[in-house]
Amino acid sequence: MPALFFLAGLVSKDHLKPIGVFALTQLRWLIYPYVLWSVIFVVLQNVFASATNAPTGLNALLTIVWQPVSVLWFLYALIYLKIADYALREWSQGTFCILTIG
């Protein structure tokens, strides 16, 4: 999975966009699908609770901001990493900046 994030960073041109365009792009391409599929997954997990290994309540939807739905962890991580990347690039104002997470 580190390769996914590495490649996402290599092909990203988000740092060239104004903050408003960046926010709308993230909303359209990452946040909306994350919320939509989180709702679908949690609802289906409740509908078929007797057939799942780890049934959850609908209150799991309230925690998707800080605790991602298990199968959507990569979208959750990508959202926060792209926001951190944009903020660091703006903060560094074009100087070389390396962020190591791990």
Image (cartoon, rainbow, N blue to C red):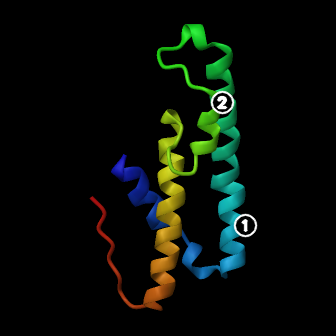
The quarter of the rendered structure image containing the C terminus is: bottom left
Is residue 27 rendered to the left or right of residue 91?
Answer: right
- All told, the count of numbered labels is 2
Q: Nearer the viewer, residue 65 or 88?
A: 65
101 over 16 or under it: above or below: above
Q: What kind of residue is marked 1?
A: Leu
Q: Residue 38 appears at what percent x and percent y?
A: 63, 37
Q: What residue do we see at 65% from left, 72% from top?
A: 22
Extreme-top residue of the structure: 50
Is residue 16 rendered to the left or right of residue 20?
Answer: left
Q: Residue 74 appears at what percent x and percent y?
A: 48, 46
Quadrant of res 57:
top right
Residue indicated by mark 2: 58
Q: Nearer the viewer, mark 1 or mark 2?
A: 2
Q: What kind of residue is marked 2?
A: Leu
Residue indicated by mark 1: 24
Q: Nearer the viewer, residue 8 or 63?
A: 63
Crowding near the residue tagged with mark 2, few <14, some 14–19, many ≥20 C-alpha atoms within 10 Å: few
Q: CA distance from mark 1 to mark 2?
A: 28 Å
98 over 31 or under it: above or below: below
Crowding near the residue tagged with mark 1, few <14, some 14–19, many ≥20 C-alpha atoms within 10 Å: few
Q: What residue do we see at 50% from left, 60% from top?
A: 80
Q: Residue 52 appears at what percent x and percent y?
A: 53, 14
Is residue 16 rendered to the left or right of residue 100?
Answer: right
* Disc on the earlier residue, 1 or 2: 1
Q: Residue 12 appears at what percent x and percent y?
A: 53, 67
Disc 2 element: helix
35 over 46 or under it: above or below: below
Is residue 38 rendered to the left or right of residue 2?
Answer: right
Disc 1 element: helix
Q: What residue do we see at 72% from left, 57% from top?
A: 28
